Image: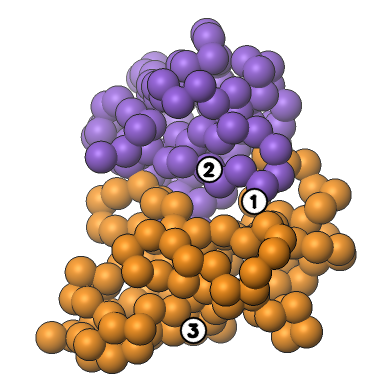
Amino acid sequence: AQSVAQPEDQVNVAEGNPLTVKCTYSVSGNPYLFWYVQYPNRGLQFLLKYITGDNLVKGSYGFEAEFNKSQTSFHLKKPSALVSDSALYFCAVRGPTDSWGKLQFGSGTQVVVTP
Amino acid sequence: DTEVTQTPKHLVMGMTNKKSLKCEQHMGHRAMYWYKQKAKKPPELMFVYSYEKLSINESVPSRFSPECPNSSLLNLHLHALQPEDSALYLCASSGGGPNQPQHFGDGTRLSIL
């Protein structure tokens, strides 16, 4: 069965500094990987996905993620964080043989960006 | 603005009430989902509809009853809920297929008295 881990409950970063949110996964075969962000009192918003191809994926709001097959990681990055990036971030994975309706979510990482 | 619309945004109900949550999408998606989310936790899948047929039920108690009247609408009927059912209920839709992202509504915050 597939699984995904977000090792940090919270990440604190100063505005203007680089932001990294970590995600590792365990899947038999090639994974489908997704990042979502949830702002307070909102639903989850899709940021980006990795299906195949280039290991560096660019997404919404200046975010990007790097797929590393050897380290089974899919870390989310932003070169210069904004206070408005403060939110809850979820990594999600689906395996190639999984029912396409099922996403396995990580536990979430709270990002706090201070002015 | 989200493309998946959920109503109501907030709902308070007693344990003996019957109520319904509604979800609507106009993106032509053929898969729709219900999730339950507790504060600061990831969403938990409840039901998946594919082409208006129930394809996944994650062993959800029968006090939750989903309905998909057409490809754009998804309902969740609630009856005799328990206090532990208080949560944010999220609806999502997708184009179907493993590489398609799910698009979420902003949810209904449900409180059971």
Secondary structure at badge 3 equals loop
On residue B102, the disc is 2
Q: CA distance from mark 3 to mark 2?
A: 24 Å
How busy is the neighbourhood of tag 2: few (under 14 within 10 Å), some, or many (20 plus)?
A: many
Q: CA distance from mark 1 to mark 3?
A: 20 Å
Secondary structure at badge 1 equals loop
Residue type (three-letter) at the residue carrying disc 1: Leu
Q: Residue furthest left?
A: A115
On residue A103, the disc is 1
On residue A8, the disc is 3
Please indicate whether residue B8 sits to the left or right of residue B38 in the image.
left
The chain holding disc 2 is B
Residue A36 image point, x, y percent: 46, 59
Residue type (three-letter) at the residue carrying disc 2: Gln
Mark 1 and mark 3 residues within 8 Å of each other at the beta carbon: no
Q: Residue at x 24, y 34 (%)?
A: B10
Q: Which chain is orange?
A: A
Residue type (three-letter) at the residue carrying disc 3: Glu
Residue B86 image point, x, y percent: 38, 43
Q: Which chain is purple?
A: B
Q: Quadrant of residue A47?
A: bottom left
Q: CA distance from mark 1 to mark 2?
A: 9 Å
